[in-house]
Image (cartoon, rainbow, N blue to C red):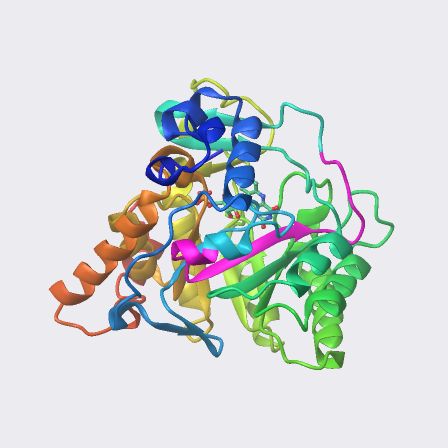
Amino acid sequence: MILSAFSPLLKLPALAGLTRDTLLRMDPETAHGATISALKLGLAPQQGQPDGAELRTSLCGLDLANPVGMAAGFDKNAEVAAPLARMGFGMVEIGTVTPRPQAGNPKPRLFRIGPAQGVVNRMGFNNEGHEAAFARLKETRIPAALGVNIGANKDSADFVADYFLGVERFAELADYLTVNISSPNTPGLRNLQADEALKRLLGEVLSARAKARMRVPVFLKIAPDLDEAALDAIAETILATDLDGLIVSNTTISRDMVVGLENAGETGGLSGRPLFALSTRKLAQMRQRLPALPIIGVGGIHSAQSALAKIEAGANAIQLYSALVFGGLDLLDVIKRGLVAAVRAEGKTNIAQLVGRKTADWAEGRIGG
Ligand SMILES: Cc1cc2nc3c(=O)[nH]c(=O)nc-3n(C[C@H](O)[C@H](O)[C@H](O)COP(=O)(O)O)c2cc1C
């Protein structure tokens, strides 16, 4: 459903019309499928210049050429991790993958809220399952950090066991794993964020990791709809484990920011620009609770300024997805150039020096409130 940027590089006449405007006129899921097909055919732009030293970032021991990643949900089946990496993302997160293949919810299940540059999805973890993703990734080496985002089958008798299987399956292939318990589209999944359930889940996940040959970093991806008490409990649980990092956040079930707009009433998770302030505030509130923990900030990044704001709120690295639907892949370069300019303008040498310098303002609502 994205990508304006391939138009100058299209090689096949049949796909030559696949500009951003064409994609935006198509049904969103059809447009997404066309984009994945185009990427598989190699019809994507490739990064020209290597990233400058200003953007080089270390995250849980991973050496990233830049801190900007493709968020989970775009490449659910690990089909296009390599072309995405060659475009210049510093990390590419595939999935969510579940142990067994599943069809997801009935279509339509993906909606644009055009005037707000928002997206609502209730995909429901449509994916081909662990084995299909594993087989593809086994053959793939990418010039970026590879994240594998793991989840649970909707009809699973034991969600926690599904995460255990995910760690077992992907620990040796992934540069990092994401435990996604924040999708609103699998009934009951987000209950794993609650105190006792989270303790049990992290215990199992980290014991699976301990059995693996490699010590792969594990991130937990949380919802933006958690209140302060829930954030307290999650932070306390994390501090009692050796979880490596957090991803804040997944999509929101709130619609406050898009009231009255077409498709705002669709069930599912809202992402894109309307999610920016909420997800950035929750990120800052977690940063205050966990000053030393690596955090990836996601939600509503749509420009160089919003990418910088996410970092200043406390993100060590960032990811995006929805804005690419509206802005095309050119946005990746715009963001990276803007971050380099911001580092230089502040008289600094590296983006890490800007992390968290406005955490309190975001957490307490003086910015974005
Ligand atoms: C169509 C769609 C599918 C998504 N699927 C997943 C998923 O499978 N797993 C996951 O952890 N997040 C998923 N997400 C959430 C994104 O990874 C991200 O957290 C969220 O969209 C906020 O970022 P954005 O505003 O830049 O899109 C999905 C988002 C969209 C729009």
**Image position, residue 50 (x, y; %):** 31, 65
Residue at the (51%, 39%) spot, across then down: 38
Residue 109: quarter of image: top right
Compare residues 137 and 348 and report the one nearer the observer. 137
Compare residues 25 and 290 and report the one nearer the observer. 25
Quadrant location, the C terminus: top left
Q: How many marks?
A: 0
Residue at the (73%, 62%) spot, across then down: 166
Q: As drawn, is 182 to the left or to the right of 91?
A: right
Residue at the (74%, 76%) spot, across then down: 207
Q: As drawn, is 62 to the left or to the right of 135?
A: left
Which residues lie in the magenta part? 85-104
Q: Is residue 151 magenta?
A: no
Q: Is residue 96 magenta?
A: yes
Q: As drawn, is 122 to the left or to the right of 99?
A: left
**Image position, residue 114 (x, y; %):** 40, 24
Q: Is residue 62 visible?
A: yes
**Residue lying farthest right?**
157
**Image position, residue 358 (x, y; %):** 27, 61
**Image position, residue 364 (x, y; %):** 33, 54
Q: Is residue 260 above or below residue 353?
A: above
Q: As drawn, is 188 to the left or to the right of 111?
A: right
Compare residues 94 and 183 and report the one nearer the observer. 94
Q: Is residue 367 visible?
A: no
Residue 212: quarter of image: bottom right
